[in-house]
Image (cartoon, rainbow, N blue to C red):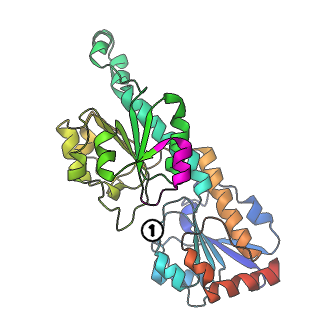
Amino acid sequence: MAGFRVALSGDFRKADGSPTFPDFDLTPLREAKNVEMAFLDNASPLKGEQLENFDALILLAQRFDAGSIPKSGRLAVVARFGVGYDTVDVPACTAGNVALVITPDGVRRPVAVSIITFMLALTGKLMVKDRLARSGPPGFAARGEHMGVGLVGKTLGSLGVGNIGAEMFRLAKPFDMQFIAHDPYADKQVAAELGIELVSIEQLFARSDVLTINCPLTTDTHHIVNAGRLALMKPTAYLINTARGPIVDQKALTKVLAEHRIAGAGLDVFEQEPTDPGDLLLKLDNVIAAPHALCWTDQCFAGNGAADVRAVLDVMKGQMPRGIVNRDVMNNPGFKAKLEAFGKRFG
């Protein structure tokens, strides 16, 4: 146990051994003194035996459950590459004295930009106009039948106003829209500074011209966007989801879109991923879809990677990392003992 051992989940490498995401710079780990790094074999969920001799794990998309906790008790941190953690058993991490860390700084701007991209594409009828331009004279003749929607004075709503939701509103300031949000955990000072009116969930659905989903997937938010709430929306309103697919009842959404009871949707996430090519939702002309990757840019992945590396190195030095999800673990004697031991050896 000479060095601080860092594991990376196997999906960070392709079958030929090349990096899945070259913008994830591992140089700081490779060059750090006392750090040993290794890639795991592919498994989902990960198995505890794979992690017996590691102090830290950087995790991409593979699942991490109670059976992933090594019996040795050595593992101290799971650094998730991104902000979603529905693939991780959080209580199991806490019970095992393992901190779960996410990367809010890496995704805040890229995801917020994705939301704005959807909003502009939907209201500008971008996909329809692209098809018209490609169809020659008949398309140009029909362009007056597909007028876009201006944003000045329209209401931008958000279900959730945390890290990404707040950034979205910051980016939307120049559009001169009205801002509303529903979030029982909202920072009221941040909301006030951004000019966001906090409203009930019913008001959010009823008043929004563009309704965006910016909350995590939990037992409480699963299908929180359901048939009853979709029925409250204006027929001219748009729904955008870049968070997690199961937050929205996809069957209910497909029905209201097919019946044109709302104007359209921009979806980067789905209840089933990968999607079924035969899904009716994907055949609707008032839907713009992306494969859970609209925010994927060189900057996003570089930022996520840098945040994970920083968290791992902080733990090695005996310091509390940023972005801890299971904050209760910070008070666990077992976790604090790990940090103290790391600090003495590597700090």
Q: Is 148 rendered above or below residue 48? A: above
Along the viewing direction, whichever of 20 and 317 lies nearer the viewer: 317
Q: Position of residue 14 (x, y in %)?
A: 55, 59
At which x and y percent is residue 146? Answer: 30, 20
**Label tally:** 1
Q: Label 1 sits on what residue type?
A: Thr
Query: Quadrant location of the C terminus?
Result: bottom right
For this orientation, the residue located farthest to the left is 259
Percent position (x, y) of residue 191? Answer: 51, 48
Callout 1: SS: loop
Residue range (magenta): 184-196
| Mark 1 crowd level (few <14, some 14–19, many ≥20, 10 Å Cα) | some
At a point 80% along the width and 64% down the height, the residue shown is: 31
Residue 209 occupies which quadrant of the picture? top left
Residue 246 at x, y percent in the picture: 33, 58
Quadrant showing the N terminus: bottom right
> Is residue 68 positioned above or below 198 on the image?
below
Which of 89 and 210 lies nearest the eye of the viewer?
A: 210
Query: Looking at this view, is 298 or 119 the one in front?
Result: 119
- Whether the magenta-drawn stretch holds residue 187 is answered as yes
Determine the residue positioned at 67% across, 84% down. 336
* Disc 1: which residue: 87
Report whether 277 appears left or right of 133: left
Residue 110 appears in the rendering: no
Q: Is 90 situated above or below 115?
A: below
Q: Is residue 190 magenta?
A: yes
Q: Is residue 35 above or below residue 267?
A: below
Q: Is residue 60 visible?
A: yes
Task: Give the residue displayed 54% in from the left and 74% down from the top.
Answer: 326
